[in-house]
Image: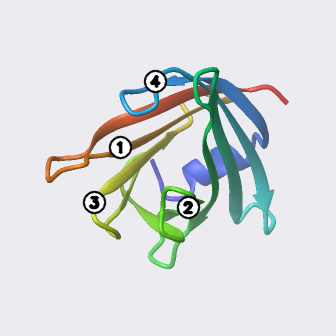
Amino acid sequence: MPANELLSRLAAAPGVYRGRGDGPESGPFVARMAVTSAVHGRALILDYEATSDRDGLQHVEHTVLVVGEGGRPELHVACLKLPGVVRFAQTAPNQFTAYEGPMVARITLTVPQPGAVSYGWWWSRDEAEPREQFRAEMRRSG
């Protein structure tokens, strides 16, 4: 996917996305992501949250998606599970990796079709290769 295609596809369909997710770390949950264009579409704000009946609010995240200085998309992520804002650079199509902190973490972000978003987090608590801990499949609802 060309560097700006992910940004362009999401910028073309701002709004609220809702759906369900699951994973070994989270268990089943309900996901919501608000996609807002900023700076005339040069940046996107992704406000994501996951909730479940068992745990209530599980995850809250505020992310900025931009094309970085090197021409590759970057996610700048702030959430309670990270030490401040962490930069995830695109390392493969739809895959963003951060090398900061005690472990390698990855985020997958795809737009499989217009009006749909898939969002997942990967990591490992040991020295092993990261594995998917949760993923949400969402559709635009407004």
Badge number at residue 103: 3
**What kind of element bears circle 3?**
loop
Q: Amino acid under label 4?
A: Gly
Residue sitting farthest toward the bottom = 69
Q: CA distance from mark 4 to mark 1?
A: 14 Å
- N-terminal of the two: label 3 or label 1? 3
Q: Amino acid under label 1?
A: Trp
Q: CA distance from mark 1 to mark 2?
A: 14 Å
Q: Is residue 74 left or right of residue 124?
A: right
Q: CA distance from mark 3 to mark 1?
A: 10 Å
**What kind of element bears circle 2?**
strand
Q: CA distance from mark 3 to mark 2?
A: 16 Å
Nearer the observer, disc 3 or disc 2? Answer: 3
Question: Which residue is tagged 2?
Answer: 77
Q: Position of residue 130 (x, y in %)?
A: 25, 46
Please tell me in which quadrant of the rendered image residue 136 appears: top right
Q: Nearer the viewer, residue 73 or 79?
A: 79
Q: Position of residue 87 (x, y in %)?
A: 47, 68
Nearer the observer, disc 3 or disc 1? Answer: 3
- N-terminal of the two: label 3 or label 4? 4
Q: Amino acid under label 2?
A: Val
- Badge 2, how many Cα within 10 Å: few under 14, some, many 20+? some
Please give the name of the residue rendered at 34% of the width and 68% of the height, measured from the top-left corner. Answer: 101
Badge number at residue 122: 1
- Badge 4, how many Cα within 10 Å: few under 14, some, many 20+? few
Q: Amino acid under label 3?
A: Met
